[in-house]
Image: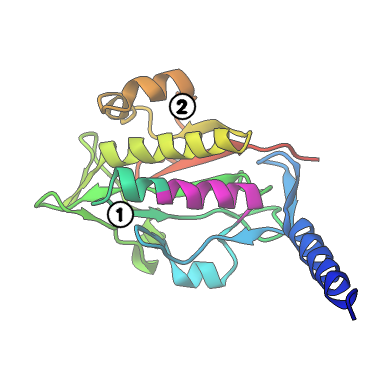
Amino acid sequence: MRHVFPIFTFLILSITASYASASDSICHGTTSNGSLENGVQLPSEGNNFESYSNVARLAGRTYVHSSVYNIVVAAYSDLEREQPNKVYKYAETGFKDGGQFSPHKTHRNGLSVDFMVPVVNSIGESVHLLTNPFNKFGYNIEFDNSGHYEDFKIDYEAMAAHIVALHREAKKLGYDIWRVIFAPELQPNLFKTKYGVYLKENIQFSTKRSWVRHDEHYHVDFIVPCQ
């Protein structure tokens, strides 16, 4: 009987280790021509963030690579301390197995995440940008060149803090951010924040206008080794 507990413990640890290994994602190809194995679905909500749509989440449109999952969730945790009064919302990511993700041209291997821009209301409170079927879950919103839409204004300080948190968490895990796509005419506002120098030195922003404007959301591509 003296050997039962050690053997039992060994079996449990072996099973747990096998499960952990099996749950790690594997990406293939590129963001625009790739696939994903063992994609992980982002949480529907947290203390300072939420999904852009429960309907879209149930449709399987919020899966990412397991390493990207860890980066995104850890960054939100960091922001609870650094930006305690700010709230955030993530948007489209990809399917569990990756592949074509209409209408996007990328989001195919679990390394791409869209985030809705953080906003403040008319009295300066951090609030979630409204996303529903009537505005194509937020993607149909158009901010003007001063960053306003109806009673909302883009919170560039909160957005810059989020990008920095994502980058720092990616680096902790040995990864990086490849690029951030955000409307070029609005990017200078990010560099005016207290995070501006860090962004200029560490983040590659796309300077070319994309096929969609990317004013109501910012697209982040992560660098994680793929097969």
> Is mark 1 in CB contact (under 8 Å) with mark 2?
no
Residue lying at 48% horizontally and 41% vertically, measured from the top left: 219
Confirm whether residue 220 shows in the render: yes
Alpha-carbon span between mark 1 and mark 2: 23 Å
Q: Is residue 47 magenta?
A: no
Confirm whether residue 104 shows in the render: no
- At which x and y percent is residue 138? 37, 57
Outermost bottom residue: 1
- The answer to which of marks 1 and 2 sits earlier in the sequence is 1
Q: Is residue 74 magenta?
A: yes
Residue lying at 65% horizontally and 52% vertically, measured from the top left: 66
Displayed quadrant of residue 192: top left
The main secondary structure of the magenta stretch is helix
- At which x and y percent is residue 15? 82, 67
Task: Compare residues 182 and 36 and report the one nearer the observer.
Answer: 36
Q: Secondary structure at mark 2?
A: loop
Part of the protein shown in magenta: 64-77
Check disc 2 and report the residue beneath it.
Answer: 205
Outermost front residue: 2
Mark 1 is on which residue type? Answer: Val
Displayed quadrant of residue 215: top left
- At which x and y percent is residue 102? 60, 55
Q: Give the vertical position of 37 relative to 13 (above or below).
A: above
Residue 87 numbered tag = 1
Quadrant of the snapshot with the N terminus: bottom right
- At which x and y percent is residue 223? 63, 34
